[in-house]
């Protein structure tokens, strides 16, 4: 990699005079649009970029340095960020496309610049598919965005200039870039309130993807321009006169919708362009700000509706209830001259800045990220919410979910305390519950909307007051995935469902292994896979899943495999009690006793009852438990907080027994712990040392799986009681790199 000392000093660089002129123009834009400018930093960034790209050329035949210069100009003029972002725009490709390193960037410009450039640098390496590689890069970009929003804002400028110069690429690449821009970057720019950038990205993409429709709309707008401009002037003249009489400082003008927005409206309404009435809107921008500015907006609204009759159903108050991207304005539709409908937007200058530049406007008004206000925090919260499940099974699934959340339409609902929440259109009470808090969503059992009970699939509307009813015994319903619309709800439900399935599969496999060993069956995984197919299971995983969930009796599998392999069964009758124990014991729940009874049933120690420790909750001494008499006469011991307890206690109370633990000693039970943490050299040794040596506890089994530097594992232990298990858990949590220790439950 290139070191800083290898970069020539400014006077040693032979820089083309025209690029000196472009740098001068860039600095002029910075002085005009940024709150403060470190010109030396921007000059140093330009010099380094110029030198790094000295041998690079674009497909258009231009020197490559033109691209970072144009991107930096967009950042300064069109987005209006800060000087750090302008410098980052000049350097955004040097690590990805040249020999310069991130270490050099940090050495020359500091850690903040290093992080921004790193976020803008694509992941290198070999991926299974082009789609997966692209998805991984999008996910990296989103992760960087959660740390510093300037990453995505510079990326918008980069994409905009690339779209402006797309004609130099082969047609196939043009279509790919345009499709990705229209599908991801344009709606993402909208989500961040960058209206101008979003509109340009949409129109440039639309021009590539559907050139005929694009040209038709553009030519029609040009044909209508003279007539449209005359109508706008006729509409504005009396308004302008009244506003001046009232002493307002303002700008008033007509704004034509961008081409792609008109195209979407034509498709949605199934009408030709000459039947679309709101192709343009009248915008009034007041120079007053703050509280007075908001009051002035309402006064001007009153003036407008005095002049022109309004349509009440077309009124929108985005000042009292801003959009989630910070947008504020009053919208009303009125009948103008000739009875035509005209949309009027009323806002202050600061509101206009935010409407056009979104989150970027806050750099101007709040002077950078150090002073994060409520609106900027909402942006960050949205990003973090999407990244709440940071390791999805597939990057492509993450990107798919991410795109689903780049919605245009929003609704505004209220908590019982009157707090406002923004949700996408089509959201349900379950989406609302997860928006409030993950645990509220996980424990949601019902909902009231405006005081009335509604189904959890009920579609919410703006203005609804929503109350969520929860229960600690409730768990997510996999069917919720069919109607929730927010990323957080979908990802959490899917995560829980996958985890439940994985636990059931693991348990089912363990049960089968124990049954197989007891029956002295030898069968390969491949042969067992064939058996699963013969038994009409789609795969081995489903077979283990149904065993683990109690949907398929593993003894039937034993009998089938024995019959298939022609093994003779033992004819001698077994002791009835031993047969019952063999039938109901499994790897998680069998007590390893020394012959002394450990249970008190109905107040007495019982020595002649068949007892089974339920695999769904794995009770050990110290747990609150109860007994359930099975149809075979075996007493199944469940923890009182077992997921199956509610159904058994309510619906089959006549088969419930009071159970407590006796005080007998020298009794060992098998318990299971689930561990998660960072995969590092010596981790397994540290875990086993803590258990076996420090706490003198016997390990029955230990399984560890690792992926991307993270491990998860299950440890089977012999413990005497709950206190013993809790001591183990607390000691394991202290190991460096352990992130979680949980009691393993079905």
Image: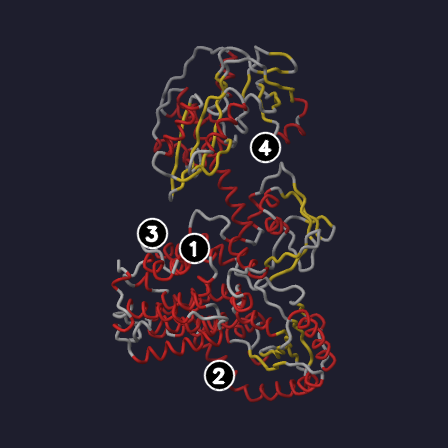
Task: Give the label, 1 or 2, closer to the camera.
Answer: 1
Mark 1 → mark 4, Cα distance in angstroms: 36 Å
- The residue pinned by badge 3 equals 128
Q: Does 171 appear above or below 578?
A: below
* Of callouts 1 and 4, the N-terminal one: 1
> For the residues marked 2 and 4, what is the alpha-carbon distance in whole angstroms?
66 Å
State the mark number for residue 219.
2
Q: CA distance from mark 3 to mark 2?
A: 45 Å
Tell me, yes or no, whether the two marked residues, 2 and 4, touch with CB atoms within 8 Å.
no
Nearest to viewer (mark 2 / mark 4): 4
- Of tags 3 and 1, the one toward the viewer is 1
Q: Name above or below for residue 423 compared with residue 237.
A: above
Foreground of the two, 257 or 53? 53
Badge 1 or badge 2: first in the primary sequence: 1
Element on which disc 4 rests: loop
The answer to the question of whether label 1 and label 2 lie on touching residues, with beta carbons closer than 8 A, is: no
């Amino acid at each position: 990699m290139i070191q800083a000392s290898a970069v020539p000093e400014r006077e040693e660089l032979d820089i083309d005079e025209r690029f000196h002129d472009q740098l001068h123009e860039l600095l002029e834009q910075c002085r005009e649009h940024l709150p403060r400018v470190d010109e030396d930093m921007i000059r140093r960034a330009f010099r380094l970029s110029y030198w790094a790209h000295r041998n690079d050329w674009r497909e258009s035949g231009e020197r490559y340095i033109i691209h970072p210069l144009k991107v930096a100009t967009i950042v300064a003029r069109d987005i209006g960020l800060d000087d750090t972002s302008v410098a980052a725009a000049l350097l955004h490709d040097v690590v990805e496309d040249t020999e310069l390193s991130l270490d050099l960037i940090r050495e020359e410009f500091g850690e903040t610049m290093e992080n921004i450039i790193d976020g803008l640098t694509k992941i290198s390496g070999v991926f299974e598919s082009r789609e997966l590689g692209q998805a991984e890069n999008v996910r990296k970009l989103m992760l960087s965005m959660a740390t510093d929003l300037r990453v995505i804002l510079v990326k918008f400028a980069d994409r905009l200039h690339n779209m402006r110069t797309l004609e130099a690429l082969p047609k196939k690449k043009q279509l790919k870039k345009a499709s990705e821009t229209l599908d991801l970057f344009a709606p993402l720019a909208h989500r961040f309130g960058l209206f101008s950038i979003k509109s340009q990205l949409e129109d440039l993409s639309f021009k590539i993807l559907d050139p005929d429709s694009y040209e038709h709309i553009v030519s029609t707008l040009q044909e209508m321009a003279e007539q449209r401009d005359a109508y706008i002037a006729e509409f504005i003249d009396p308004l302008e006169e009244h506003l001046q009489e009232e002493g307002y400082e303002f700008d008033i003008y007509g704004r034509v919708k961008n081409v792609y927005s008109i195209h979407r409206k034509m498709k949605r309404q199934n009408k030709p362009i000459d039947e679309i009435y709101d192709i343009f809107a009248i915008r009034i921008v007041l120079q007053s700000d703050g509280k007075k500015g908001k009051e002035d907006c309402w006064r001007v609204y009153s003036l407008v509706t005095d002049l022109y009759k309004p349509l009440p159903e077309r009124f929108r108050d985005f000042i009292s209830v801003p959009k989630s991207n910070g947008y504020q304005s009053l919208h009303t539709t009125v009948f103008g001259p000739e009875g035509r409908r005209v949309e009027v937007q009323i806002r202050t200058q600061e509101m206009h800045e935010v409407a056009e530049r979104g989150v970027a406007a806050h750099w101007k008004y709040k002077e950078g990220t150090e002073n994060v206000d409520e609106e900027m925090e909402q942006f960050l919260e949205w990003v973090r919410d999407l990244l709440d499940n940071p390791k999805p099974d597939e990057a492509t699934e993450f990107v798919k979910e991410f795109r689903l959340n780049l919605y245009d339409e929003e609704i505004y609902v209220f908590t019982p305390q009157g707090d406002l929440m923004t949700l996408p259109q089509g959201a349900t009470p379950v989406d609302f519950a997860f928006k409030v808090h993950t645990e509220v969503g996980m424990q949601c059992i019902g909902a009231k909307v405006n005081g009335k009970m509604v189904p959890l699939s009920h579609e919410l509307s703006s203005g609804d007051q929503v109350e969520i009813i929860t229960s600690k015994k409730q768990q997510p319903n996999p069917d919720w995935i069919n109607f929730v619309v927010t990323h957080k709800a979908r990802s959490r439900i899917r995560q829980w469902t996958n985890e439940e399935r994985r636990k059931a599969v693991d348990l089912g496999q363990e049960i089968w292994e124990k049954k197989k060993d007891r029956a002295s069956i030898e069968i390969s995984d491949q042969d067992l896979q064939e058996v699963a197919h013969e038994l009409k299971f789609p795969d081995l995983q489903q077979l283990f899943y149904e065993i683990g969930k109690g949907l398929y009796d593993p003894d039937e599998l034993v009998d089938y495999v024995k019959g298939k392999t022609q093994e003779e069964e033992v004819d001698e009758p077994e002791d009835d009690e031993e047969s019952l124990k063999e039938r109901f014991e499994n790897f998680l729940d069998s007590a390893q006793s020394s012959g002394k009874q450990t249970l008190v049933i109905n107040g007495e120690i019982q020595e002649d009852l068949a007892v089974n420790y339920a695999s769904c909750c794995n009770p050990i001494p110290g747990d609150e438990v109860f007994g359930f008499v099975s149809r075979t006469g075996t007493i199944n011991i469940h923890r009182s907080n077992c997921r199956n307890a509610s159904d058994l206690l309510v619906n089959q109370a006549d088969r419930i027994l009071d159970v407590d633990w006796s005080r007998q000693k020298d009794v060992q039970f098998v318990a299971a712990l689930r561990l998660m943490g960072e995969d590092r050299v010596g981790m397994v040794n540290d875990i086993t040392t803590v258990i076996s040596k420090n706490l003198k506890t016997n390990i029955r089994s230990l399984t560890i799986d690792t992926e991307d530097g993270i491990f998860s594992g299950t440890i089977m232990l012999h413990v005497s009681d709950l206190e013993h298990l809790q001591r183990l858990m607390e000691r394991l949590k202290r190991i460096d790199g352990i992130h979680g220790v949980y009691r393993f439950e079905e």
